[in-house]
Image: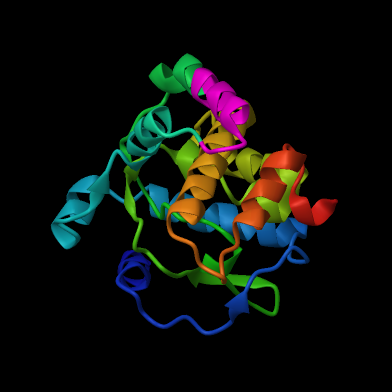
Amino acid sequence: MFSDILDMISGSWISGEHMSNRTQDTKFINDLASLLVQIHKLQLKYIVFAFPHINESLMHGTVDRLRKHSPPNNERFCEDAIKEFDEIKDTLSENTFIHGDLWYKNVIIKDKVVQGLIDWDKKCIGDPHWELRMIRRWIGWDGLKLLIFHYNCSTGSKLSIDIIRTLDKIALCNSYNERIRKPNPDKPVSVIQGYIQHWPESWWQK
């Protein structure tokens, strides 16, 4: 299993399709949680040896950029997010190997069964809460609660949905800034603006 995980991280082909907001049943969420547990349990000494140029501190780097450049039209949302982050930052620890970009297009399924994760460009040493900052937009808050429950039961961790809520805000502000700075018709700013306007719900739920 260890070699299979390393092959996946190295970019081995995974057949299937992207998950969607229709892929939310209990088995799918439990399977996704189990996969994340396997990834997060990888010993860092092996990861650093296999990937010597792995990123570190992406979470704090993201927050530092937001302190310097608040998203236009969303300054208050960003200010509140940073304030909340400052209240929890001492509880976060960056000692876990994470995928770093967990959203629906990076989760591959086949017949509703999780096959693996793709696009490991943002893999890093980070906090497990940071890993889960975006996925709730596709599995919903109830789905995230179930995922956290399974994860915590499997690892003995105490991941908090409140912390993930704050990191989700941070991620939205960062995505908004990035899409303004680098316009891309395939990644319209309006999508992130919609998430911010309707937060804490997902835009597609409106």
Residue 22: quarter of image: bottom right
Which residue is depicted at the point 77% across and 60% down? 25
Q: Residue furthest front?
A: 72
Of 179 and 118, nearer the camera is 179
Going by the image, does 185 lie left or right of 95? right
Q: Is residue 40 magenta?
A: no
Which residue is depicted at the point 49% across and 62% down? 183
Which residue is depicted at the point 61% across and 34% down? 74
Q: Give the residues in magenta.
A: 71-84
Q: Is residue 75 magenta?
A: yes
Residue 75: quarter of image: top right
Q: Is residue 143 visible?
A: no
132, above or below 68, in the image: below
Which residue is depicted at the point 23% across and 55% down? 47
Q: Residue furthest right?
A: 206
Residue 188 horizontal/vertical position (percent): 60, 62
Q: Quadrant of the N terminus?
A: bottom left
Of 178 and 145, nearer the camera is 178
Residue 138: quarter of image: bottom right
Residue 42 horizontal/vertical position (percent): 32, 51
Going by the image, does 137 lie left or right of 7? right
17, above or below 74, in the image: below
Would you say the magenta stretch is mainly helix, strand or loop? helix
State the count of labels: 0
